[in-house]
Protein backbone atom coordinates (compact mmCIF):
# COMPACT_ATOMS: atom_id res chain seq x y z
CA UNK A 1 0.00 0.00 0.00
CA UNK A 2 1.37 3.38 -1.04
CA UNK A 3 1.41 5.73 1.96
CA UNK A 4 3.39 8.58 0.38
CA UNK A 5 1.02 11.55 0.19
CA UNK A 6 -2.66 11.29 0.85
CA UNK A 7 -5.08 13.95 -0.26
CA UNK A 8 -8.78 14.45 0.36
CA UNK A 9 -11.01 13.48 -2.50
CA UNK A 10 -14.76 13.37 -2.91
CA UNK A 11 -16.79 12.74 -6.00
CA UNK A 12 -18.68 15.87 -7.00
CA UNK A 13 -21.86 13.86 -7.61
CA UNK A 14 -21.80 12.13 -4.22
CA UNK A 15 -24.79 12.92 -1.98
CA UNK A 16 -23.83 15.22 0.88
CA UNK A 17 -23.96 13.65 4.34
CA UNK A 18 -22.66 15.71 7.24
CA UNK A 19 -22.65 15.23 10.99
CA UNK A 20 -22.42 16.83 14.40
CA UNK A 21 -20.71 14.64 16.99
CA UNK A 22 -20.78 16.00 20.56
CA UNK A 23 -19.17 14.27 23.52
CA UNK A 24 -21.65 14.10 26.42
CA UNK A 25 -19.13 14.81 29.16
CA UNK A 26 -21.05 18.04 29.66
CA UNK A 27 -23.90 20.07 28.21
CA UNK A 28 -23.62 22.04 24.98
CA UNK A 29 -22.28 25.60 25.28
CA UNK A 30 -21.97 28.45 22.77
CA UNK A 31 -18.83 26.95 21.20
CA UNK A 32 -20.68 23.67 20.68
CA UNK A 33 -23.61 25.54 19.14
CA UNK A 34 -21.30 27.23 16.62
CA UNK A 35 -20.08 23.82 15.46
CA UNK A 36 -23.60 22.39 15.40
CA UNK A 37 -25.06 25.34 13.49
CA UNK A 38 -22.16 25.49 11.02
CA UNK A 39 -22.41 21.78 10.21
CA UNK A 40 -26.21 22.00 9.99
CA UNK A 41 -26.16 24.98 7.62
CA UNK A 42 -23.51 23.39 5.43
CA UNK A 43 -25.59 20.23 5.05
CA UNK A 44 -28.79 22.12 4.26
CA UNK A 45 -27.04 24.51 1.87
CA UNK A 46 -26.03 21.40 -0.09
CA UNK A 47 -29.58 19.98 0.11
CA UNK A 48 -27.91 17.19 2.04
CA UNK A 49 -28.40 15.11 5.16
CA UNK A 50 -27.37 16.19 8.67
CA UNK A 51 -26.78 13.43 11.20
CA UNK A 52 -26.03 13.48 14.92
CA UNK A 53 -23.66 11.04 16.58
CA UNK A 54 -23.07 10.91 20.32
CA UNK A 55 -19.38 10.28 21.03
CA UNK A 56 -19.86 8.55 24.37
CA UNK A 57 -16.96 6.07 24.26
CA UNK A 58 -15.83 6.78 27.81
CA UNK A 59 -18.87 5.62 29.77
CA UNK A 60 -17.47 6.85 33.08
CA UNK A 61 -17.31 10.45 31.81
CA UNK A 62 -20.29 10.37 29.45
CA UNK A 63 -23.57 9.91 31.28
CA UNK A 64 -26.88 9.00 29.57
CA UNK A 65 -28.55 11.95 31.31
CA UNK A 66 -26.11 14.34 29.64
CA UNK A 67 -26.79 12.75 26.26
CA UNK A 68 -30.50 13.42 26.73
CA UNK A 69 -29.71 16.99 27.79
CA UNK A 70 -27.74 17.56 24.57
CA UNK A 71 -30.54 16.14 22.42
CA UNK A 72 -33.00 18.44 24.20
CA UNK A 73 -30.71 21.44 23.66
CA UNK A 74 -30.39 20.71 19.94
CA UNK A 75 -34.13 20.31 19.57
CA UNK A 76 -34.81 23.56 21.43
CA UNK A 77 -32.56 25.34 18.93
CA UNK A 78 -34.35 23.79 15.96
CA UNK A 79 -31.40 21.57 15.04
CA UNK A 80 -33.11 18.26 14.39
CA UNK A 81 -31.06 15.46 12.80
CA UNK A 82 -32.10 13.45 9.78
CA UNK A 83 -32.60 9.89 10.92
CA UNK A 84 -31.68 8.01 14.06
CA UNK A 85 -29.05 9.34 16.44
CA UNK A 86 -25.95 7.12 16.55
CA UNK A 87 -24.39 6.33 19.93
CA UNK A 88 -20.82 5.10 20.00
CA UNK A 89 -21.16 3.07 23.20
CA UNK A 90 -23.24 0.55 21.21
CA UNK A 91 -20.63 0.05 18.48
CA UNK A 92 -17.67 -1.64 20.21
CA UNK A 93 -17.83 -4.70 17.96
CA UNK A 94 -17.40 -2.49 14.89
CA UNK A 95 -14.33 -0.77 16.38
CA UNK A 96 -12.84 -4.11 17.42
CA UNK A 97 -13.17 -5.37 13.86
CA UNK A 98 -11.41 -2.26 12.51
CA UNK A 99 -8.63 -2.62 15.09
CA UNK A 100 -8.15 -6.24 14.06
CA UNK A 101 -7.85 -5.21 10.40
CA UNK A 102 -5.09 -2.77 11.29
CA UNK A 103 -3.32 -5.52 13.23
CA UNK A 104 -3.59 -7.84 10.22
CA UNK A 105 -1.64 -5.35 8.10
CA UNK A 106 0.95 -4.79 10.88
CA UNK A 107 -0.01 -1.19 11.63
CA UNK A 108 -0.57 -1.59 15.38
CA UNK A 109 1.38 -2.72 18.44
CA UNK A 110 0.75 -3.21 22.13
CA UNK A 111 1.99 -0.54 24.53
CA UNK A 112 2.36 -0.63 28.32
CA UNK A 113 3.61 2.93 28.77
CA UNK A 114 1.52 5.06 31.12
CA UNK A 115 0.51 8.70 30.79
CA UNK A 116 2.69 9.53 33.80
CA UNK A 117 5.70 7.92 32.13
CA UNK A 118 5.11 10.01 29.02
CA UNK A 119 4.72 13.23 31.02
CA UNK A 120 7.93 12.41 32.88
CA UNK A 121 9.67 11.73 29.57
CA UNK A 122 8.73 15.21 28.39
CA UNK A 123 10.02 16.76 31.64
CA UNK A 124 13.28 14.84 31.33
CA UNK A 125 13.78 15.73 27.67
CA UNK A 126 13.33 12.15 26.43
CA UNK A 127 10.14 13.08 24.60
CA UNK A 128 8.66 16.26 23.13
CA UNK A 129 5.30 17.91 23.49
CA UNK A 130 3.27 17.59 20.29
CA UNK A 131 -0.02 18.82 18.86
CA UNK A 132 -2.06 16.34 20.89
CA UNK A 133 0.03 15.79 24.01
CA UNK A 134 3.44 14.12 24.34
CA UNK A 135 4.82 12.70 21.10
CA UNK A 136 5.15 8.99 21.75
CA UNK A 137 8.86 8.07 21.41
CA UNK A 138 8.13 4.54 20.18
CA UNK A 139 9.28 2.77 23.33
CA UNK A 140 7.08 -0.29 22.81
CA UNK A 141 7.41 -0.59 19.04
CA UNK A 142 10.09 -3.24 19.32
CA UNK A 143 9.22 -4.44 22.80
CA UNK A 144 7.59 -7.85 23.19
CA UNK A 145 4.55 -7.09 25.31
CA UNK A 146 2.85 -10.20 26.63
CA UNK A 147 -0.81 -10.77 25.81
CA UNK A 148 -1.35 -11.23 29.55
CA UNK A 149 -0.21 -7.66 30.36
CA UNK A 150 -2.68 -4.80 30.40
CA UNK A 151 -1.72 -2.77 27.37
CA UNK A 152 -3.05 -0.16 25.02
CA UNK A 153 -2.98 -0.49 21.24
CA UNK A 154 -1.08 2.08 19.20
CA UNK A 155 -1.27 2.92 15.49
CA UNK A 156 1.95 3.20 13.49
CA UNK A 157 1.70 6.55 11.72
CA UNK A 158 3.24 7.08 8.28
CA UNK A 159 6.55 8.91 8.11
CA UNK A 160 5.60 10.83 4.98
CA UNK A 161 3.88 14.21 4.94
CA UNK A 162 0.09 14.26 4.73
CA UNK A 163 -1.51 17.14 2.86
CA UNK A 164 -5.09 18.29 2.58
CA UNK A 165 -7.02 21.43 1.75
CA UNK A 166 -9.29 22.61 4.51
CA UNK A 167 -12.32 24.43 3.14
CA UNK A 168 -11.95 27.30 5.61
CA UNK A 169 -8.29 27.17 6.69
CA UNK A 170 -6.64 26.38 3.35
CA UNK A 171 -3.71 24.06 2.72
CA UNK A 172 -2.48 22.04 5.70
CA UNK A 173 0.58 19.77 5.78
CA UNK A 174 1.71 17.62 8.67
CA UNK A 175 4.26 14.93 9.41
CA UNK A 176 2.56 12.78 12.02
CA UNK A 177 5.76 11.12 13.19
CA UNK A 178 7.11 14.50 14.32
CA UNK A 179 3.88 16.22 15.45
CA UNK A 180 1.78 13.50 17.11
CA UNK A 181 3.60 10.18 17.10
CA UNK A 182 1.90 6.79 17.30
CA UNK A 183 -1.49 7.42 18.96
CA UNK A 184 -3.44 5.10 21.23
CA UNK A 185 -6.43 3.52 19.48
CA UNK A 186 -7.60 1.48 22.45
CA UNK A 187 -6.62 2.17 26.03
CA UNK A 188 -5.41 -0.49 28.42
CA UNK A 189 -8.85 -0.40 30.10
CA UNK A 190 -10.39 -1.32 26.71
CA UNK A 191 -11.89 2.12 26.03
CA UNK A 192 -11.56 2.95 22.34
CA UNK A 193 -9.91 6.23 21.40
CA UNK A 194 -11.74 9.04 19.66
CA UNK A 195 -9.52 8.78 16.57
CA UNK A 196 -10.45 5.23 15.63
CA UNK A 197 -14.16 5.58 16.36
CA UNK A 198 -14.36 8.91 14.50
CA UNK A 199 -12.87 7.44 11.33
CA UNK A 200 -14.80 4.18 11.45
CA UNK A 201 -18.13 5.87 12.16
CA UNK A 202 -17.66 8.49 9.45
CA UNK A 203 -17.14 5.66 6.98
CA UNK A 204 -20.01 3.50 8.29
CA UNK A 205 -22.39 6.47 8.32
CA UNK A 206 -21.41 7.52 4.80
CA UNK A 207 -20.17 10.94 5.95
CA UNK A 208 -18.91 12.96 2.98
CA UNK A 209 -18.22 16.29 4.72
CA UNK A 210 -16.96 17.02 8.23
CA UNK A 211 -17.51 20.55 9.56
CA UNK A 212 -16.19 21.00 13.10
CA UNK A 213 -14.17 23.32 15.35
CA UNK A 214 -10.69 24.49 14.42
CA UNK A 215 -9.20 22.86 17.52
CA UNK A 216 -9.58 19.51 15.73
CA UNK A 217 -7.77 20.57 12.56
CA UNK A 218 -4.43 19.32 13.95
CA UNK A 219 -5.94 15.82 14.26
CA UNK A 220 -7.30 15.68 10.73
CA UNK A 221 -4.07 14.36 9.13
CA UNK A 222 -4.16 11.49 11.63
CA UNK A 223 -7.78 10.78 10.73
CA UNK A 224 -6.85 10.81 7.05
CA UNK A 225 -4.03 8.33 7.74
CA UNK A 226 -6.35 6.01 9.64
CA UNK A 227 -9.00 6.22 6.94
CA UNK A 228 -6.51 5.38 4.21
CA UNK A 229 -5.14 2.47 6.21
CA UNK A 230 -8.60 1.02 6.85
CA UNK A 231 -10.36 2.03 3.63
CA UNK A 232 -7.64 2.57 1.00
CA UNK A 233 -10.05 2.41 -1.93
CA UNK A 234 -12.55 4.99 -0.66
CA UNK A 235 -12.34 8.79 -0.45
CA UNK A 236 -11.91 10.51 2.87
CA UNK A 237 -14.44 13.18 3.84
CA UNK A 238 -14.00 16.81 2.83
CA UNK A 239 -12.97 18.75 5.94
CA UNK A 240 -13.75 22.28 7.07
CA UNK A 241 -12.82 23.71 10.48
CA UNK A 242 -14.74 26.61 11.99
CA UNK A 243 -13.37 29.46 14.15
CA UNK A 244 -13.44 28.77 17.87
CA UNK A 245 -15.39 30.81 20.40
CA UNK A 246 -13.05 32.26 23.01
CA UNK A 247 -13.87 33.34 26.52
CA UNK A 248 -12.84 36.60 28.18
CA UNK A 249 -9.64 34.87 29.32
CA UNK A 250 -8.63 34.14 25.73
CA UNK A 251 -9.17 30.39 26.08
CA UNK A 252 -11.66 28.50 23.94
CA UNK A 253 -15.05 27.84 25.44
CA UNK A 254 -15.07 24.23 26.55
CA UNK A 255 -16.42 21.92 29.19
CA UNK A 256 -12.92 21.73 30.67
CA UNK A 257 -12.90 25.52 31.04
CA UNK A 258 -16.38 25.42 32.63
CA UNK A 259 -18.23 27.12 29.78
CA UNK A 260 -21.85 27.78 30.80
CA UNK A 261 -24.46 25.44 29.35
CA UNK A 262 -26.82 26.78 26.70
CA UNK A 263 -30.04 28.15 28.16
CA UNK A 264 -32.78 26.54 26.06
CA UNK A 265 -35.15 29.39 26.98
CA UNK A 266 -32.85 31.77 25.06
CA UNK A 267 -32.54 29.66 21.93
CA UNK A 268 -33.14 32.55 19.53
CA UNK A 269 -30.50 34.72 21.16
CA UNK A 270 -28.05 31.80 21.30
CA UNK A 271 -28.50 31.06 17.60
CA UNK A 272 -28.00 34.70 16.68
CA UNK A 273 -24.76 34.82 18.67
CA UNK A 274 -23.55 31.64 16.93
CA UNK A 275 -24.51 33.00 13.51
CA UNK A 276 -22.63 36.26 14.12
CA UNK A 277 -19.55 34.24 15.09
CA UNK A 278 -19.85 32.39 11.77
CA UNK A 279 -19.91 35.70 9.88
CA UNK A 280 -23.62 35.64 9.06
CA UNK A 281 -26.00 38.56 9.15
CA UNK A 282 -28.82 38.41 11.66
CA UNK A 283 -32.33 39.89 11.25
CA UNK A 284 -33.30 43.16 12.81
CA UNK A 285 -36.90 42.08 13.38
CA UNK A 286 -38.39 39.37 15.54
CA UNK A 287 -38.13 36.54 13.03
CA UNK A 288 -38.59 33.06 14.41
CA UNK A 289 -35.93 30.37 14.48
CA UNK A 290 -37.19 28.62 11.35
CA UNK A 291 -37.12 31.81 9.27
CA UNK A 292 -33.64 32.71 10.52
CA UNK A 293 -32.29 29.25 9.72
CA UNK A 294 -33.61 29.45 6.18
CA UNK A 295 -32.01 32.87 5.69
CA UNK A 296 -28.68 31.71 7.15
CA UNK A 297 -28.75 28.67 4.89
CA UNK A 298 -29.02 30.96 1.85
CA UNK A 299 -26.20 33.15 3.16
CA UNK A 300 -24.03 30.07 3.76
CA UNK A 301 -24.67 28.73 0.28
CA UNK A 302 -23.60 32.01 -1.33
CA UNK A 303 -20.48 32.26 0.83
CA UNK A 304 -19.18 28.69 0.99
CA UNK A 305 -20.74 26.39 -1.61
CA UNK A 306 -18.23 27.30 -4.28
CA UNK A 307 -15.48 25.62 -2.15
CA UNK A 308 -17.57 22.62 -1.17
CA UNK A 309 -15.57 20.22 -3.32
CA UNK A 310 -12.09 21.53 -2.56
CA UNK A 311 -9.44 18.86 -2.81
Image: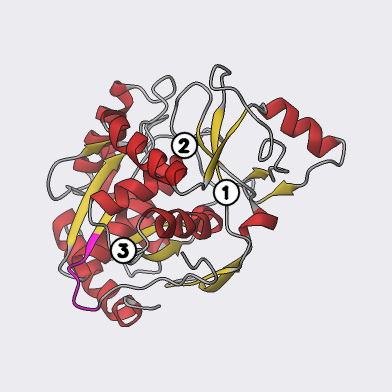
Q: Nearer the viewer, mark 1 or mark 2?
A: 1
Residue 285 in sight from this viewpoint: no
* Numbered disc 1: secondary structure: loop
- Residue sticking out furthest to the top: 148
The magenta stretch is 12-17
Relative to residue 310, is residue 156 drawn left or right?
A: right
**Residue marked by disc 3:** 209
Residue 252 in sight from this viewpoint: yes
**Residue marked by disc 2:** 193
For marks 1 and 3 on the same chain, the one whose residue lies earlier in the sequence: 1
Relative to residue 150, is residue 196 drawn left or right?
A: left
Q: Are marks 3 and 2 in contact (CB under 8 Å)?
A: no
Q: Is residue 190 above or below residue 103?
A: above
For marks 3 and 2 on the same chain, the one whose residue lies earlier in the sequence: 2
* Numbered disc 3: secondary structure: strand
- Displayed quadrant of residue 144: top right
**Residue marked by disc 1:** 156
- Displayed quadrant of residue 89: top left
Q: Nearer the viewer, mark 1 or mark 3?
A: 1
For the residues labelled 1 and 2, the Cα–Cα distance comes to 15 Å
For the residues labelled 1 and 3, the Cα–Cα distance comes to 26 Å
For marks 1 and 2 on the same chain, the one whose residue lies earlier in the sequence: 1
Q: Position of residue 236 (x, y in %)?
A: 36, 64
Q: Are marks 1 and 3 in contact (CB under 8 Å)?
A: no
Q: Position of residue 17 (x, y in %)?
A: 22, 60
Amino acid sequence: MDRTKWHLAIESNSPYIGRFAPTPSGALHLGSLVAALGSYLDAHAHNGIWKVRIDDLDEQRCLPATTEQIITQLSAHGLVPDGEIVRQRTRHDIYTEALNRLADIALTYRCICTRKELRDAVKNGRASEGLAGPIYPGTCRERAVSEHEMAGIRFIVPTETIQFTDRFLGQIEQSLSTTIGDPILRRSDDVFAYHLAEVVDNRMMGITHVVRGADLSALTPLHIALHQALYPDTPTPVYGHLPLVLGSNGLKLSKTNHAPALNTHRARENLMAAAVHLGLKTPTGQNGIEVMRADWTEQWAKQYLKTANSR
